[in-house]
Image (spheres, rainbow, N blue to C red):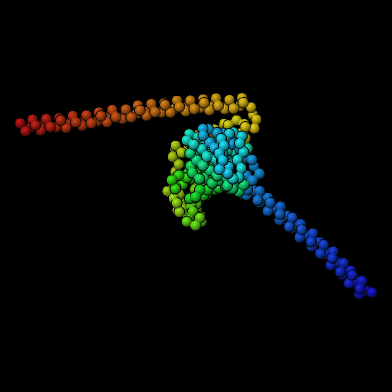
Amino acid sequence: MKSRTARRRRSGALIINWGVYMKKIFACLFAGLIIIGFFYMCTNVFAEYNSKIISVKGNAKLIQEGQEIEAKIGDSVSQGQSIKTGANSYVDLSLDGSTDNVIRVEEKTEVSFKEISNSRLDVLDGSIMARLKNMPKGSTFEIKSPISVTSARGTGWRFHHKNKKDKAEAHENDIFVAGFDKDGNKIGEILLLFGHKTQIDKFGGPSNILKLNFMEKNQWKNWTSKMDRKEGRGGGDGNGGNSNNFSKRLDKSLKNIDKKLEDKSQELEKKQKSRIDSLLEQQENRGCGEEEGEGEYYLKGGE
């Protein structure tokens, strides 16, 4: 009896220990699932966000399953859809309801949101600008074409895919740039520093790293300034018509100022060119006079 009781006690102790172990295992598994879920949410930065169009100009189409509809302010854009713009047209898309994380689809451009939940945008043709100022820590966003891929962890850059060549411009902070070989593997990945641009050829890595020129910087500044001035952050969710009218008047006033400054600059440039031409003409005439004088001197000397 004693040994049987002892066995029972030992057996009971063993059962109790297994229960403790199982609880610890389940607790570890649960904690692991929480960590994996949190990492997945951070990596897929826009998975839960409702991407919306906040600005439209000209001929812009929203495409899904081959059907085209006119893109309008307030339209949601989800995975599997595409945006296509015509000449002198654009679409501004907010990825999270603010102008902190926004993309401009420029004119004559087609982009596809094949994996928007995985923070990736595919450029089929044309140019886009992306400003991502408020991304979760550790997350990344990719802009991909058949030739190359650019990515960043919260920055601003411009990307062009035209005539089997790509160009990347780093306007705010640094970006990663890589090309693709014939098998689709990344090659020549570099960190493109802020204020620079690079070209990527088909089946080649980034090359020809140069500084951004004045026009490229100005185009970026004009767009980001417009985003900063934009009233009703989130695009059409109800700040009223007064704010929209104010924004339009402000944009018009700024355009008038820009035009006046441009006209003044052109006028000064013309005056400067005219002055230079006049000085060159005077110098040429003076040179001709000296030659003629020397000719007369030698002619008299010969006599």
Q: Is residue 184 above or below residue 109?
A: below
Q: Is residue 201 above or below residue 67?
A: below
Looking at the image, residue 266 sits to the left or right of residue 294; the answer is right
**Residue 240 percent across, percent down from the top left:** 64, 27
Which quadrant, please, contains the C terminus? top left
**Residue 112 percent across, percent down from the top left:** 55, 44
Of the pair 148 and 99, the residue shown nearer to us: 148
Quarter-wise, where is residue 294 in the image? top left
Going 50% across and 55% down the picture, which residue do you hit?
Answer: 184
Residue 170 seen in render: no
Looking at the image, residue 162 sits to the left or right of residue 41; the answer is left
Going 15% across and 30% down the picture, which residue do you hit?
Answer: 292
Which quadrant, please, contains the N terminus? bottom right
Going 61% across and 42% down the picture, which residue do you hit?
Answer: 78
Q: Is residue 113 above or below residue 203?
A: above
Q: Residue placed farthest to the right in the image?
A: 1
Residue 38 seen in render: yes
**Residue 152 percent across, percent down from the top left:** 55, 47
**Residue 194 percent across, percent down from the top left:** 50, 44
Q: Is residue 155 above or below residue 265?
A: below
